[in-house]
Amino acid sequence: MTARISVACLDMAGTTVADEGSVMSAFRAAMEQFGLVPGAPGYDRATEIVRVTMGQSKIEVFRRILGDESSAAAANSAFEERYARIVGAGEIAPLPGAEQTLGALRDAGIRSASPPASRPRPGTSCSTRSAGAP
């Protein structure tokens, strides 16, 4: 029996879209509300944590930086709001071939998925949706 691919799990920032530093910008905006600004104690450490954990769950990164659930949740919400504004302003763009690839997957009946960066569901590593769907 031949296995058929039914889902393709694709990363977003830097893989399917060029974000030109928008993820880091959203992290910085979220950390500002906790006094983590350039020159402040803890800023360099926080920025380094963000860099080395890029691609991991944002809430987990904020937990590591801020140390408590309430602060991490507030920072995560601020990150999501800032990133949504960046996306809404058109500051990210598909990488060459990304749209065609997603279309080809959709046309082949293969669903696309993206790793949940901010709010992973327990027991999942990718959230699926139809390729090309919003």
Image (tube, grey):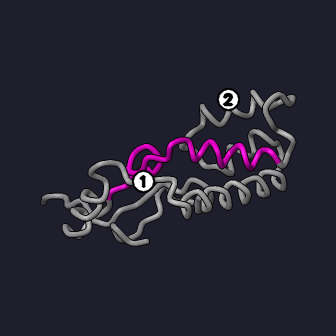
Q: Which residues are the magenta region?
A: 8-32
Where, quadrant-wise, is the C terminus in this rendering? bottom left
Element on which disc 2 rests = helix
Say few, some or many: other residues with alpha carbon within 10 Å of mark 1 (under 14 / 14 to 19 / 20 or more). Answer: some
Q: Which residue is mark 2?
A: 48
Q: Amino acid at mark 2?
A: Glu
Task: Return the x and y of residue 67 as percentages of the image width and height.
Answer: 82, 42
Q: Please say whether residue 67 is one of the residues in the magenta stretch.
A: no
* Residue at 67% in and 57% down: 82
Image position of 36 (left or right of 76) = right
Where, quadrant-wise, is the N terminus in this rendering? bottom left
Task: Return the x and y of residue 99 as percentages of the image width and height.
Answer: 30, 59
Task: Return the x and y of residue 27 as percentages of the image width and height.
Answer: 68, 45
Q: Spatial distance from mark 2 to mark 1, Cα to Cα?
A: 26 Å
Q: Quadrant of residue 85?
A: bottom right
Q: Nearer the viewer, residue 111 or 78?
A: 78
- Mark 2 or 1, which is nearer the eye? 1
Q: Amino acid at mark 1?
A: Ala
Task: Return the x and y of residue 25 as percentages of the image width and height.
Answer: 64, 44
Q: Which residue is mark 1?
A: 93
Element on which disc 1 rests = strand
